[in-house]
């Protein structure tokens, strides 16, 4: 992903929970840095929701964390980056 192109300057799903948080690193560091940040944050949030000892799995917070995970996945998919690592890893294992 490069810093030029139609997607690098805008944040899809402007009404989403995470739109402003995604927009900040996008403007500051570019698309490649944002891609890594979104992937890393998605991984952290997903683990927190699945781990019973984390407060993110508590019913009071779980829906918010799941909504954020969905926003991150949508952003990755809209920018052609959702599932890339898994596909590359499965090809190298073959």
Image: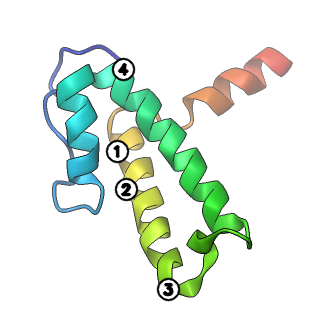
Which of the image's four quarters has the N terminus?
A: top left
- The answer to whether residue 77 is left or right of residue 82 is left
Give how far across and how far down residue 23 sits, in percent: 21, 40
From the image, tell me which residue sits under label 4: 32
Whole-angstrom CA distance, mark 4 to mark 1, is 13 Å
Query: Closer to the camera: disc 4 or disc 1?
Result: 4
Nearest to N terminus: mark 4 or mark 1: 4
Answer with the quarter of the image where residue 2 lies. top left
From the image, tell me which residue sits under label 1: 75
From the image, tell me which residue sits under label 2: 71
- The residue at the point 84 percent across, 20 percent down is 93
- The residue at the point 51 percent across, 48 percent down is 42
Query: Closer to the camera: disc 4 or disc 3?
Result: 3
Q: Is residue 34 above or below residue 2?
A: below
Nearest to N terminus: mark 4 or mark 2: 4
Nearest to N terminus: mark 3 or mark 2: 3
């Amino acid at each position: 992903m490069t810093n030029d192109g139609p997607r690098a300057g805008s944040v899809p799903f402007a009404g989403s929970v995470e739109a402003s948080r995604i927009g900040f690193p996008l403007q500051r560091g570019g698309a490649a840095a944002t891609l890594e940040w979104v992937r890393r944050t998605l991984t952290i949030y997903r683990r927190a929701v699945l781990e019973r000892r984390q407060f993110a799995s508590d019913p009071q917070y779980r829906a918010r964390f799941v909504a954020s995970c969905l926003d991150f996945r949508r952003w990755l998919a809209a920018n052609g980056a959702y599932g890339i690592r898994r596909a590359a890893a499965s090809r190298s294992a073959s």
